[in-house]
Amino acid sequence: MHWTIFGGEGFVGKRLVDILRAQGRDVFVPGRYHTSRDVPERGYGHAIWAIGLTADFRTRPFDTIDAHVGALTPILRENAFESLLYLSSTRIYQHATTACENAAISVNPNDPSDLYNLSKLAGESVCLAATESVRVARLSNIVGAREAQRDTFIGALCREAHNGHILLQSALNSAKDYLWIDDAADVLVKIAERGTQRVYNVGSGRQLSHAEWLAGITEATGATARVLDGAPETTFPSIDVTRVQSEFAFRASDPLARTNEIVMY
């Protein structure tokens, strides 16, 4: 069975392409202007929708909706795939009390920061209304080597560290779930091939605090650090990864153990 990675030039998508090709799989990466009219004669095979916006969604609302919903819908309607896995985000649990796959999700369209969550949920909904061969994977915060090159919280800390000093603008006890890129890619392939559920959380199941990240990054780089006075605390509910652990024997590695790779330029 061949594979198609939509968004195969992005951070997660590129790693999926690399891993699949290293396994000898046949992988098609559609170009930026690919449409449902350009379906390969043999179809898409196992498809993964890795197209998305992250840090810049607030300044690009229309592109965000298009990436997470608009461009996806014609592909779903065409149904020229063996399976399709839609990459969503555990950020949708931001206002939830629990973070399991069946949790009720709260969003506020009056809050500009909820545009991302709303667009991902709309993408999930249209996927789950499609055929049973379409699944959803909600990814936690994915980190990898040379994080300083990415527009992420950890990337920003790494860039500041390379300049010698980190000014942390959120409280030390702030915490989120983080997952190493290869762990994520490996289990996403398994979900796409043989997942039995419609929705999966893909995370480590462990909250890493900003204090832990600050300690690891300053030790690796020799940078100094301080916390902004009155810095707010930002926390998310702990991600329930029972489903992916029980079905695929998934056990995440500790991203902090890869700090030397993460801080590399």
Image (cartoon, rainbow, N blue to C red):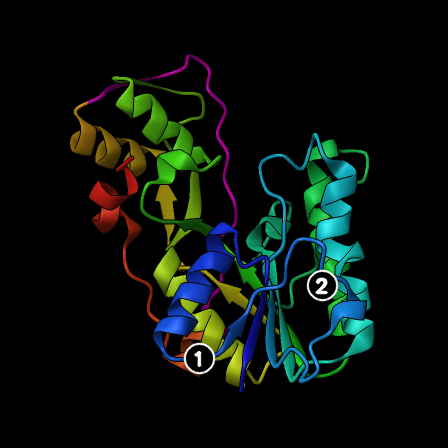
217 in the magenta segment: no
Quarter of the view holding residue 7:
bottom right
Residue 41 shows in the view:
yes
Segment tinted magenta in the rendering: 223-243
Main SS category, magenta section: loop
233 in the magenta segment: yes
Query: Please, what secondary structure does the residue beneath circle 2 have?
Result: helix
Horizontal and vertical percent position of residue 71 = 77, 57
Residue type at tag 1 = Arg
Residue 242 shows in the view:
no
Horizontal and vertical percent position of residue 173 = 38, 34
Q: In this view, does 50 lie above or below 176?
A: below
- Mark 2 vs mark 1: give the one in front: 1
Residue type at tag 2 = Glu
Q: Nearer the viewer, residue 135 or 175?
A: 135
Q: Distance between the residues labelled 2 and 1?
A: 27 Å
Q: Give left or right: position of 145 versus 114.
A: left
Horizontal and vertical percent position of residue 202 = 48, 64
Q: Give left or right: position of 66 versus 201.
A: right
Q: Give left or right: position of 18 versus 5.
A: left
**Residue denoted by label 1:** 25
**Residue denoted by label 2:** 124
Residue lying at 64% horizontally and 75% vertically, measured from the top left: 84
Residue lying at 35% horizontally and 26% vertically, measured from the top left: 159
Query: Please, what secondary structure does the residue beneath circle 1 have?
Result: loop
Q: Give left or right: position of 228 versus 79.
A: left
Q: Which of 261 and 9 is in front in this view?
A: 9
Residue lying at 35% horizontally and 49% vertically, measured from the top left: 144
Residues tagged 2 and 1 counted as in contact (Cβ below 8 A): no
